[in-house]
Amino acid sequence: MLSELSGTGELLGTILDAIPASIFMVDKDVEVLGVNRKALLMLSQDPESIIRRPAGELLHCIHSTETPGGCGTSESCRECLVRAGVSKSFSANQVVRQKVQMELVNEGDVSKVSLLITTTPFEFKQKMFVLLILEDVSELMELMDLLPVCANCKKVLDDSQEQQSVKKHFKEQLKLVATQDLCVMDKT
């Protein structure tokens, strides 16, 4: 499906389509040149209708309609982390990976979505391109907000911004008591 990469063979297309993240091949202006199957399902549009259209417009970014020029022309677009990631990949020839919060409009309803974006540059036939990879991490972010556990020390940050053990947090906040003698993970 990546129209610009058709010369690389069927195997590459099959591999890209098997990846469970939305992948967009974009140019410097963040216009879409091709997508994998997951991105096509996400956009739910005809493959031919997405080529050479701005990614923000295709994703229904709330800021893509703020000015007559569309995606990339509003004040908000200057601070767009997706656009900044693509620009940095082009200018510094490096991979950029960051979490982004976007507001998307669908039939008048605005929803916030948390995305992990990766932009990675590559050259093909002496032209530079960037793969823009979008992974929806909204559910993960909601879970982290419910129970913010430090990956290093395994302590929970409570409402007063104090760190406490998970056991103490469950006892004080949820009135749950952990067993002392039994491990639910022990299968012996």
Image (cartoon, grey):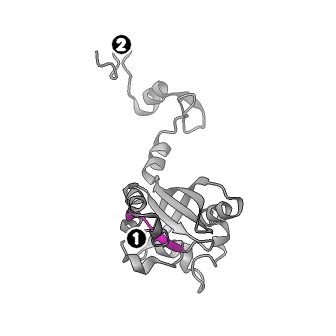
Q: For this view, does 6 lie left or right of residue 63?
A: left
- Crowd tier of the residue under label 1, counting other residues whose Cα lies within 10 Å: few below 14, some 14–19, many 20 or above: some
Q: Nearer the viewer, mark 1 or mark 2?
A: 1
- Residue 77 image position (x, y, % from top left): 63, 72
Most extreme residue toward the left is: 188
Relative side of 57 to 91, left or right? left
Q: Which residue is mark 2?
A: 181
**Image position of 72 with respect to 90: above or below:** below
Residue 58: x percent and y percent?
A: 47, 74
Circle on res. 65: none
The C terminus appears in which quarter of the rendering? top left
Which residue is farthest top?
A: 181
Q: Residue furthest right?
A: 92
Which quadrant of the rendered structure holds the N terminus? bottom left
Judging by the rendered image, the residue that carries numbered circle 1 is 43
- Residue type at numbered disc 2: Asp
Q: CA distance from mark 1 to mark 2?
A: 51 Å
Indicate the amino acid at tag 1: Leu
Foreground residue among 174 and 3: 3
Compared with 171, 132 (above or below) is: below
Name the element at disc 2: loop
Q: Are marks 1 and 2 in contact (CB under 8 Å)?
A: no
Q: Is residue 107 visible?
A: no
The magenta span reads: 32-38
Examine the structure image and report whether residue 188 is included in the region drawn in magenta. no
Residue beneath the point at 46% across and 52% down: 137
